[in-house]
Amino acid sequence: MRQHFNMKAWIGVVVLVGTLASGSAIAQDGNKLLDYCQAAIRFDDTKKVDEEVSIGYCLGLMQGVRSLIVYTNTGIPIEKQTCLPLSGISNGQTARVVVKYLKENPEQLHQDEGILTLLALRHAFPCKG
């Protein structure tokens, strides 16, 4: 079980790092991320696929960032860490958290999509000291 988790985490790390490092990535800031994750939420609600690439991109990024949290929490103070629910959080719920955060913080839409996803999750699921 632990090895399976580690493999999933490393896959997430590789996907996210590749996405963030690529100058040709589909979405690069919060504006596109908002559009893509709204498409993913529509799919989650209706099961109608209207924007396959957008949906896949958003949900893949959500999975990758969640997998990275184990590593981003390392070595930082507890009050700056993200503590996801022990019961887990789905890609769809993660997308909803991100969309809510982006709509409430439009002044941050110019920032990197991975950073915004981490900020949204930290805002929604802060660790208690």
Image: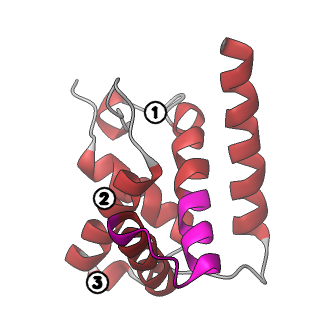
In the picture shown, does residue 91 fall above or below 128? Answer: below
Q: Position of residue 1 (x, y in %)?
A: 66, 13
Name the residue beneath numbered marker 1. 76
Q: Amino acid at mark 2?
A: Val
* Quadrant in which the C terminus is drawn: top left
Name the residue beneath numbered marker 2. 97
Q: Secondary structure at mark 3?
A: helix
Report the residue at 46% width, 52% height from top: 91
Please report the bounds of the magenta region as a residue range. Answer: 45-61
User: Disc 1 to disc 3, how far (Cα)?
Assistant: 27 Å
Q: Nearer the viewer, mark 1 or mark 3?
A: 3
Q: Secondary structure at mark 2?
A: helix
Name the residue beneath numbered marker 3. 106
In the picture shown, does residue 18 fall above or below 64? Answer: below
Label ID, residue 68: none
First of labels 1, 3 by sequence position: 1
Q: Secondary structure at mark 1?
A: loop
Q: Is residue 87 magenta?
A: no
